Amino acid sequence: MKFMWPEALWLMLLVPALIALYVFLLRRKKKVALRYASLSMVREVIGVGSKVRRHIPPVLFLLAIALMIFAISRPTAVVRMPSQQETIILAMDVSGSMRAPDVKPTRIVAAQEAARAFVNAQPARTRIGIVSFAATASVVQAPTQNREDLLAAIDRFQLQRGTAIGSGLILSLATLFPEEGIDVSALSYGRDTDPNIDHNENNEGQNTPLGQRPGGAGKKEFKPVPPGSFTSAAIILLSDGQRTVGPDPLDAAKMAADRGVRVFTVGVGTVEGETIGIEGWSMRVRLDEETLKAVAKKTEAEYFYAGNAVDLKKIYESLNARFVLQTKEMEITAFFSAAAALLSVLSAVLSLLWFNRIL
């Protein structure tokens, strides 16, 4: 426990002073009583039970004073309390492999149904954004509280070629942190992947992690934070995990981890996979769990497997529950104030019931 105003704790010296004053008054009262009655008569009238009972209201009142002093000192503590994430980004895979029917009726339809259920389950104050990715990534819906716009965006998904999981994650981060000016195009399709750029011409920063390369003049230097420490936002990545183009998903996950953002990953499909036909070509698409597990682990989040549409809905329901409790430091002055008030009232009530007076 910490105190925002620790100087006020010096007032705790009043408690032993009040105790000493109380003992002094008791002894003085006893001496006065003995002047007018014999000791045997006093003992007979007071009794053992009354001796103990008469001290209870003053003791409760002294405890109330001590709690009031603690309240004045404004104590703080790290507690788990109900909370709501401010922004959630749904990063949805719309690559051609999502048309596979190993999740009935298809992977993409099951994912859309689960996404709709997730959106409808969130409190009205939660902002949700939607990013779709195939060979490229795009913001289908900017973060909003309008549920109708979100559901309409989910219904607009169109399957495309390629799977750039890393690009989807980078764009999700750019959506969460617009003030950082994350260059999505350069990170997704820049010198790391563009064969037209001469890497030998200027190799400064090539060994720097993705998203932390030196910026232009006057650009604020990026400082990493502990993974999972940014509790006001999260990303939910839903994919079959088979990356074909774009930056490495683990590099993009490192960007998220350095910003404290957790990326919960959901694997859609089956490990055995399914053979699908695309424009005269046939290919077998399998769920790449290892990549999705690695992304979640790097960001201090979790991976979930969805073998069918029912499991997928359960996963979204469980993710919804995980966004309810949050650990943070908060002021707990109100608890001490309430306890002090309760003890004060209790001491007064007991004094009235037992002795027909307040203390």
Image: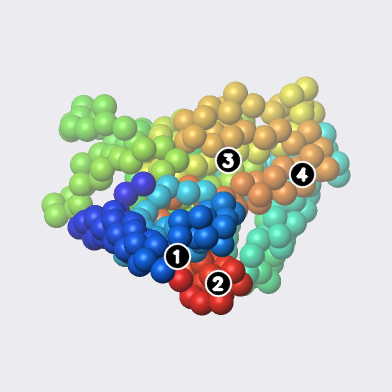
Q: Which circle's residue, 2 or 1, is located before the other in the chain?
A: 1
Q: Residues within 10 Å of mark 2 (few under 14, many from 20)?
A: few
Q: Report which quarter residue 72 is drawn in.
A: bottom left
Residue 355 is marked as: 2
Looking at the rendered image, the disc whose residue lies closer to the viewer, 1 or 4, is 1
Amino acid found under the numbered disc labelled 3: Phe
Q: Residues within 10 Å of mark 3 (few under 14, many from 20)?
A: many
Q: Report which quarter residue 24 is drawn in.
A: bottom left
x, y percent for residue 273:
77, 26
Q: Which circle's residue, 3 or 2, is located before the other in the chain?
A: 3
Cα–Cα gap, marks 1 and 4: 80 Å
Cα–Cα gap, marks 1 and 3: 80 Å
Residue 314 is marked as: 4
At mark 3, the secondary structure is strand
In the rendered image, is residue 268 in sight?
yes
Q: Are marks 3 and 2 in contact (CB under 8 Å)?
A: no
Cα–Cα gap, marks 3 and 2: 64 Å
x, y percent for residue 249:
49, 33
Q: Which circle's residue, 4 or 3, is located before the other in the chain?
A: 3
> 58 or 121, which lies in front?
58
Residue 264 is marked as: 3
Q: Which circle's residue, 1 or 3, is located before the other in the chain?
A: 1
Cα–Cα gap, marks 4 and 3: 14 Å
